[in-house]
Amino acid sequence: MKFLKYITLCAAALTLGSCADDFLDKEPSEYASEDQIKEVIERDPSAIQAYITGYYKNLFSPEAQQSHDDFGLKAFELATDLMGDDMAYLTQHFFVYDYMLDNRGSNYRRPTTCWQELYAVISGANEVITNLIGLAEDGDETVETMLGQSYTIRAYCYFWLINLYQQPYQWNQGKPGIPIYTETETRLERVPVKEVYDQILSDIDKGYNYLKGKGISSKAELNEYAAAAIYANILSFVNDYPDQWNKVAEYAQIAIQGGTLMNEDELLSGFNDINLSEVLWGADINSETNTFYASFMSNMDPFGPGYGGALGNYKMIASDLYDKIADNDIRKKWFGIDVDESNSHYNVRQYIQCKFVDVGSLGTGDTFCSDYIYLRTGEMYFVAAEALYRAGKTAEAKTMLETIMQTRVPGYTCSKSGDALLEEIEIQKRIEMWGEGRRLFDMKRRNEDLDRTHATNHSATTPKSVPAGDKLFIYQIPDKELNANSAITEQND
């Protein structure tokens, strides 16, 4: 995996101060020995910050960026949502092949960039862990915070990778997974799925415990609540984890403490600011760090000058899910815009999304300078509700559901029980998290078929029914990796 190695060159800048804007330069003009680097870090552990700055930036402005549908984690979230049943798309432009379930080939851009960018973040995290782990025993809060963020982000990247390039844990534990790179070992082969999850669980546990009690105020950095949210989502996949659902509920409820539920004004503000009260973690983007047309809002905002607006590549909620939103649900206002009768989307205009609106369109900031939201407490209420239900705590599950829904639907109560209650939790989560990259992974862990047959606004040419576990839901290992790594001997079908 030679393309990962460039990040280690940034270490040279540690002896010079900060890497600043050139922390991803592939050919720096100065070099430092490992002993010099170690000496600097032991004297001032914060000198390692360049790597942390680097891996956070790689999640929204990837060094390996190849096109305008490639903008890091939010691009992966959008691509996987389009692979599910809740997002409809009628145009032939960026992300259409994801929607067509035809963007998985080993020589295609999506599998290649996902692989490169997530492993690049892992490489940066490995450098931090390698250089700081020996200092952690001193109890230095700065060291523990940086280690906590690095273990957590490594866990999250491996979690994304294993679910993009292989089928779900529960039914595929022995199948070939992905290579693992840590501070202590390099496993070039396709490590079995269970062993990959063992690493993920080890990392997220260390990450959460290092971050616990640190009180990180910046939402652009991982904190204990974001780590708890990641922990809950990971455990949702691990069916043989001891007391699985009680543990999922426990971490989801910890994550909930990291924010307060949004009011109507916030819910309708465009999902463009990490300072929103529910946000646990995101990217703080400004005119110096934005990626212009190669950005989430360029592809989503129906009012802006980008692909999702001026070029008319509208993203829509599937009509059958829209029909499940109560008329007095604030979230119904996330959908529907006025378009001219001559517009090809005129007959489906009520489904066009306006949940995500750029600060430039709202006049509250520069165009395409909206922040990215990765994790928020709203999701965790539904994660906790599902977990409590599956743990046999029906009353608590219902209370959790009603707590969040009463901020979405005034006076909401739920009288359902049994399977109907679980279905209500799942449907409301699908509405809540529309466009935030959760649907495909939920489908995979629940072994649900893809069913687009009940919506009227899906493209006529897109696959309508695909069984759970189909190869169309996973990417092939990229050709670039196969050519560079002879230890991988088995490709996905």
Image (cartoon, rainbow, N blue to C red):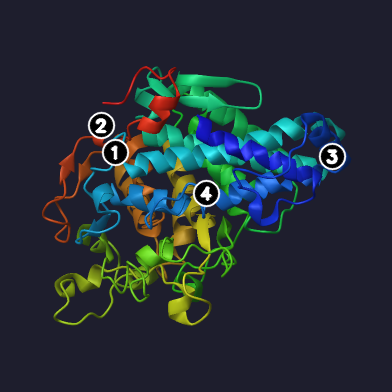
- Circle on res. 63: 4
Q: Residue at x 25, y 36 (%)?
A: 472
The correct choice, above or below, for 181 with respect to 234 in the image is: above
Residue in front for this viewpoint, 485 or 97: 485
- Mark 2 → mark 3, Cα distance in angstroms: 48 Å
Outermost residue on the front side: it is 29
Tell me the kind of residue under disc 2: Lys
Query: Mark 2 and 3 residues: CB-CB less than 8 Å, in contact?
Result: no
Q: Earlier in the sequence, mark 1 or mark 2?
A: 1
- Disc number lying in front (1 or 2): 1
Q: Position of residue 377 (x, y in %)?
A: 54, 55
Q: Position of residue 346 (x, y in %)?
A: 17, 75
Upstream in sequence: badge 4 or badge 2: 4
Q: Amino acid at mark 1?
A: Arg
Amino acid on which disc 3 is placed: Val
Residue at the extreme left of the image, as rendered: 460
- Image vertical order of residue 275 relative to residue 155, above or below: below
Which quadrant of the structure image shows residue 282?
Answer: bottom right
Label 4 or label 1, whichever lies nearer to me, is: 4
Of the two numbered discs 2 and 3 in the rendering, the one whose residue sits closer to the viewer: 3
The image's mark for residue 104 is 1
Q: CA distance from mark 3 to mark 4?
A: 26 Å
Residue at the (48%, 82%) spot, across then down: 363
- Name the residue nearer the viewer: 200 or 384: 200
Tag 2, which secondary structure?
A: helix
Label 4 Cα crowd, 10 Å radius (few <14 / some 14-19 / many 20+): some
Q: Image point 52% across, 76% down: which residue? A: 366
- Residue bearing mark 3: 40
Distance between the Cα atoms at labels 4 and 1? 21 Å
The residue that mark 2 highlights is: 471
- What amino acid type should be assigned to the residue bearing mark 4? Glu
